[in-house]
Amino acid sequence: MRTLWTLGVIGLLSSLGSDLAGQSPSATSADSTSLQGTWSMVAGAADGYQLPPEYVKTMRRIFTGNEVTVTMGGQLFLKATVELDPTASPKAIDYHMTGGPTAGSTQLGIYQISGDTVRFCFGAPNAARPTDFASTPGDRRTLSTWVRSTGN
């Protein structure tokens, strides 16, 4: 059962895009542009437990416009439209799930971009936004680090 929940939570791990009302379009646009393309997961945790390497190595995130698609082993894991708020501290991201096991829910998270590496922390679907990059047992958060795939 924990494995199934962990797999479901992994779907909460991915990425970014559109403008929020009242924000600086240039700040949002800059982050959105930085996040475009294909990313590979290099580390992840769900509910405080490190994801097994065999899961991590097959996770891919493709960000196109304001949509993100995450696959695991080539299979759809989640699809979402994304809103960014790069003026928040830490920077905020909202997923509006459109595909996968959490379709129809909203997931609130935070993100940090550094060159070709991006880090995310998400709360559980329809839960509060995390305020730090951490995942501990029982918190139902996901924490992940992604690197830009070569060729992007």
Image (cartoon, rainbow, N blue to C red):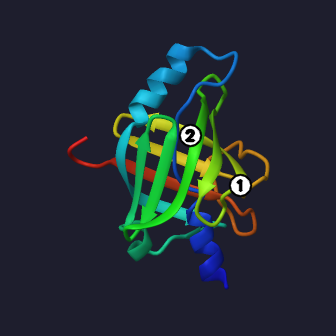
Q: Secondary structure at mark 1?
A: loop
Disc 1 residue type?
Gly
Residue behind mark 2: 111
Which of the two labelled residues, at mark 2 and mark 1, occupies the earlier sequence position? 1
Left or right of residue 24: residue 53: left
Count of picture labels: 2
Residue drawn at x 34%, y 47% is 38
Residue drawn at x 56%, y 64% is 10
* Mark 1 Cα-neighbour bin, 10 Å: few <14, some 14–19, many ≥20: some
As drawn, which residue projects farthest toward the bottom? 1
Q: Which mark lies nearer to you, 2 or 1? A: 1
- Above or below residue 85? Residue 43 is below
Image quadrant assignment for residue 48: bottom right
Residue drawn at x 71%, y 63% is 140
Image quadrant assignment for residue 94: top right
Residue behind mark 1: 104
Quarter of the picture holding the N terminus: bottom right
Residue drawn at x 56%, y 62% is 11
Image quadrant assignment for residue 132: top right
Residue 15: percent from left, percent from top? 51, 45
Residue 85: percent from left, percent from top? 63, 28
The residues tagged by marks 2 and 1 sit, at their Cα atoms, a distance apart of 22 Å
* Mark 2 Cα-neighbour bin, 10 Å: few <14, some 14–19, many ≥20: many
Left or right of residue 53: residue 135: right
Disc 2 residue type?
Tyr
Q: Secondary structure at mark 2?
A: strand
